[in-house]
């Protein structure tokens, strides 16, 4: 017989312990919801019960509503049972005849915290975190959270916690009034029982959160705070409905009362659950968890080995960024360079990175010396004898990398992991001249390496599962999301980036769409910046160099970006030279229009034999967006059919974390499926007839369109069929 999701046990002291037991996080499924309400009903009815303690099994209180159910919901579930659910929660749990105390261990999140706030007191263990993270899923709290939290901690704090998905530690929650006492885990249930009986016996206050008003202030004060928060957080409101819906519901509660508004809140929450935003954000939530699962590797019972010391070869921008990342996570690092000047430059870059972390409040000033003490410079491999991993981060030269790997094999211990930060080279070639190829792996960090959240782990057929497990774990230690990819041209993220950039250039030079218009359209879609602004940030010469790589590996479907080449000739290298696609005032990173850009574009067009006169092909904003993003979706389909990534959701998450694709759109493939494969296919086919091979839909996209199936279902096809 299946274990019940909620149990109730009544002790001799007259306290009913109601326990949610729904592994892994005690989420609130329909069964849990029914179990909790029927247990409360039973406890209220039983004469031997004086008070109630609500808790969670296995040292976890509750991780909130069952997200899988909400994700699957296709129609608005404003069911007839909803008002009665809200009534049950308000009248039975909060308004019932016996007091309830929440005994919280580990976490009380979303619906979990809402359950806790319905109780009349909350006790938590020191390691507990509490919050209402519903907005990270594109919804708002739906069990009274928008009404009870402001009444417990104040309107401003509650809004900040919800909009910015900020969790409180048990101690902070205690200070702000959300938690009544912090107690050691081993005393949690005992203390909660006592507290519940004290309320029942009138020794402690019986506080119903919805009725509290001492933290609210006057209506005018509350409305002012809400309006100020609207201004403060206005960036969060772009393109998505849930943050403003949340503020509106909080406001309604101030104007019409908390209890009445809980019904309205539940309705808004249900409506938001079916919004594209919620679907995209819930997809991203699960993608973040599945990305860590590598079949045949993480399911083999292998224990990750701890990486105690690391070495980095190459102290340039990438090497110093990776070193910074490591020392920030307390991993001692050896930085190797070929001469003392380069070494000093590398160490200076690390110092600057650490200072900037401190400036941004991410590291305390006192910790700077001890953090920097973790990095040591060297010019010699002989110091490499006891490191557990070496990451080579020199410039992209195959002979140089091969030589370094030979040196590493010679000087490092026999189980040292040998990694390369190459952004596109074949790892088999990089490690070709050594015998221990099972220890070779790619660790492709993104710039700036200590800030960007993604790291691509590139495995070859020979990379051992143990090394893969070690690196997945090490990625987590470095506070990165590790994406396992197979060794194939450009890996995953750079593959997605190149058509994005090439199409932007084609639109500008060949079709006459102004680069700033393209950038604005991409920003309005939700990208952090448009392609041309991004080129200025990363440096024009980098774009020009990677173009050559793409032309070598995919000669038939690559466009040369002559626009980049011309800017490079003019030494307009982007932000660092104060001029690129935009102009920058000295010392400023704020872009300003460059009127001379039109002249440069005319020169490029003339070189290409396109004539100098400005002839913009009339395109709507939607068409411009599609012409940039559909080739990107097309390339993502290729990445799937080539088996570069393990699953479509990995690629979705990688585009969110690696290229800034808006999270609320779920990632490139998820968004493509929302638009529909047939529309994407027909547009690409039309453009490939007009403008050539670059736009031609790949085989798997063709198949998806023909069968009206999702691109997320594209699986690896054999190389022979590609
Ligand atoms: C009506 C209400 O207002 C609506 C809601 O409550 S919406 C839900 C709000 N709650 C949340 O957003 C919390 C989401 N969960 C988390 O933040 C974290 O999972 C946690 C802090 C609870 C635990 O973290 P951690 O121990 O690292 O475990 P984590 O790997 O994240 O999750 C373990 C498993 O539980 C699943 N899970 C976590 N929370 C879940 C939830 N609320 N519903 C369904 N599954 C959930 C994860 O997908 C994962 O599944 P897997 O093992 O199959 O991959």
Image: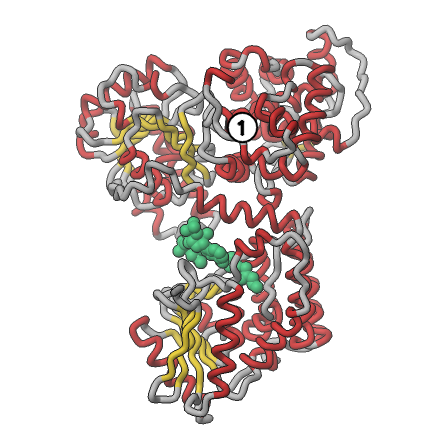
Where residue 325 sits, quadrant-wise, is top left
Q: Nearer the viewer, residue 627 or 707?
A: 707
Q: Is residue 539 above or below residue 171?
A: above
The residue carrying pointer 1 sits among few (fewer than 14), some (14 to 19) or many (20 or more) residues within 10 Å by Cα, namely some
Question: Residue at 46% of width from left, 88% of height from top?
Answer: 46
Residue lying farthest front? 1
Report x, y in % for residue 295: 37, 38
The correct choice, above or below, for 555 with respect to 713 in the image is above
Give the left or right position of residue 304, taking residue 82 as reference: left
Q: Nearer the viewer, residue 191 or 152?
A: 191
Image quadrant assignment for residue 23: bottom left
The color scheme shown is: secondary structure
Could you tell me which residue is drawn at 44 percent across and 44 percent down? 290
Rendered location of residue 520, percent (x, y)? 70, 34
Side (left or right) of 280 relative to 367? right
408 vs 139, left or right, is: left
Residue 579 appears anywhere in the view? no
User: Which quarter of the picture shows residue 613?
Assistant: top right
Q: From the viewer's perspective, is residue 592 above or below residue 119?
A: above
Residue under the image location 59 percent in, 77 percent down: 88
Q: Percent position (x, y) of residue 182?
A: 38, 74
Q: Residue at point 65% right, 25% down? A: 581
Q: Which residue is mark 1?
A: 538
Say above or below: 318 vs 41.
Answer: above
Specify whether residue 365 is in view. Answer: yes
Specify the quadrant that holds the N terminus.
bottom left
Total labels: the figure holds 1
> Helix or strand or loop: what does disc 1 sit on?
helix
Q: Nearer the viewer, residue 203 or 636?
A: 636
Q: Position of residue 122 (x, y in %)?
A: 45, 76
Label 1 lies in ligand 1 vicinity (Cβ under 8 Å): no
Q: Is residue 93 left or right of residue 628?
A: left
């Amino acid at each position: 017989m299946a274990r019940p999701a909620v149990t109730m046990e009544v002790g001799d002291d007259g306290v009913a312990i109601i326990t949610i037991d729904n592994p892994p996080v005690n989420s609130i499924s329909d069964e849990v919801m029914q179990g909790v309400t029927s247990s409360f009903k039973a406890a209220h009815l039983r004469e031997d019960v004086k008070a109630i303690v609500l808790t969670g099994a296995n040292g976890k209180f509750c991780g909130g509503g069952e997200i899988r159910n909400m994700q699957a919901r296709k129609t608005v579930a404003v069911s007839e049972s909803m008002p009665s659910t809200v009534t049950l929660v308000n009248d039975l749990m909060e308004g019932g005849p016996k007091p309830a105390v929440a005994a919280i261990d580990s976490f009380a999140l979303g619906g979990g915290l809402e359950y806790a706030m319905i109780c009349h007191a909350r006790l938590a263990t020191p390691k507990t975190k509490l919050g209402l993270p519903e907005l990270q899923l594109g919804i708002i709290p739906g069990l009274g959270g928008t009404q009870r939290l402001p009444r417990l901690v104040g309107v401003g704090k509650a809004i900040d916690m919800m909009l910015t998905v900020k969790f409180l530690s048990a101690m902070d929650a205690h200070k702000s009034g959300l938690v009544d006492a912090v107690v050691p885990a081993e005393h949690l249930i005992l203390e909660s029982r006592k507290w519940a009986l004290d309320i029942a016996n009138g020794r402690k206050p019986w506080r119903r959160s919805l009725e509290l008003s001492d933290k609210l202030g006057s209506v005018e004060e509350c409305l002012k705070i809400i309006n100020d928060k609207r201004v403060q957080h206005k960036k969060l409101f772009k393109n998505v409905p849930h943050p403003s819906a949340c503020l509106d519901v909080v406001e309604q509660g101030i104007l019409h009362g908390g209890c009445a508004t809980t019904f309205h809140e539940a309705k808004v929450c249900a409506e938001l659950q079916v919004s594209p935003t919620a679907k995209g954000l819930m997809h991203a939530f699960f993608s973040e968890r599945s990305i860590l699962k590598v079949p045949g590797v993480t399911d083999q019972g292998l224990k990750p080995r701890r990486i105690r010391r690391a070495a980095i070869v190459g102290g340039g921008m990438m090497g110093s960024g990776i070193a910074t990342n490591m020392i920030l996570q307390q991993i001692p690092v050896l930085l190797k360079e070929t001469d003392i000047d380069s070494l000093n430059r590398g160490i200076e870059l690390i110092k600057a990175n650490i200072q900037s972390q401190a400036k941004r409040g991410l590291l305390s000033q006192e910790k700077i010396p001890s953090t920097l003490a973790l990095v040591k410079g060297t010019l010699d491999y002989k110091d490499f004898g006891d490191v557990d991993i070496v990451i080579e981060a020199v410039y992209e030269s195959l002979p140089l990398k091969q030589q370094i790997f030979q040196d590493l094999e010679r000087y490092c211990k026999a189980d040292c992991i040998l990694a390369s930060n190459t952004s596109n080279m074949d790892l088999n070639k990089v490690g070709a001249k050594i015998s221990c190829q099972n220890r070779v792996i790619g660790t492709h960090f993104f710039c700036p390496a200590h800030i960007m959240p993604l790291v691509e782990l590139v495995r070859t057929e020979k990379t051992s599962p143990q090394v893969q497990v070690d690196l997945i774990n090490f990625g987590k230690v470095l506070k990165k999301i590790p994406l396992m990819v197979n060794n194939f041209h450009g890996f995953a993220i750079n593959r997605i980036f190149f058509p994005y950039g090439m199409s932007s250039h084609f639109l500008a030079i060949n079709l006459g769409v102004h680069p700033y218009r393209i950038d604005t359209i991409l920003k309005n879609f939700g990208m952090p910046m448009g392609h041309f602004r991004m080129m200025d940030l990363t440096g024009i010469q980098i774009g020009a160099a990677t173009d050559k790589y793409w032309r070598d590996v995919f000669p038939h479907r690559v466009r040369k970006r002559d626009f980049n080449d011309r800017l490079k000739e003019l030494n307009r290298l982007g932000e660092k030279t104060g001029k690129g696609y935009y102009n920058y005032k000295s010392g400023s990173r704020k872009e300003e229009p460059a009127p001379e850009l039109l002249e440069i574009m005319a020169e490029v067009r003339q070189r290409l034999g396109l004539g100098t006169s400005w002839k913009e092909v009339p395109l709507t904003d939607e068409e411009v967006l599609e012409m940039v993003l559909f080739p990107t979706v097309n390339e993502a389909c290729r990445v799937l059919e080539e088996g570069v990534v393990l699953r479509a959701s990995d690629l979705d998450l990688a585009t969110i974390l690696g290229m800034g694709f808006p999270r609320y759109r779920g990632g490139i493939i998820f968004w493509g499926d929302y638009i529909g494969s047939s529309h994407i296919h027909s547009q690409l086919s039309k453009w490939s007839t007009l403008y050539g091979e670059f736009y031609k839909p790949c085989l798997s996209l063709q198949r998806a369109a023909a069968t009206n199936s999702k691109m997320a279902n594209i699986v690896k096809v054999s190389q022979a069929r590609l």
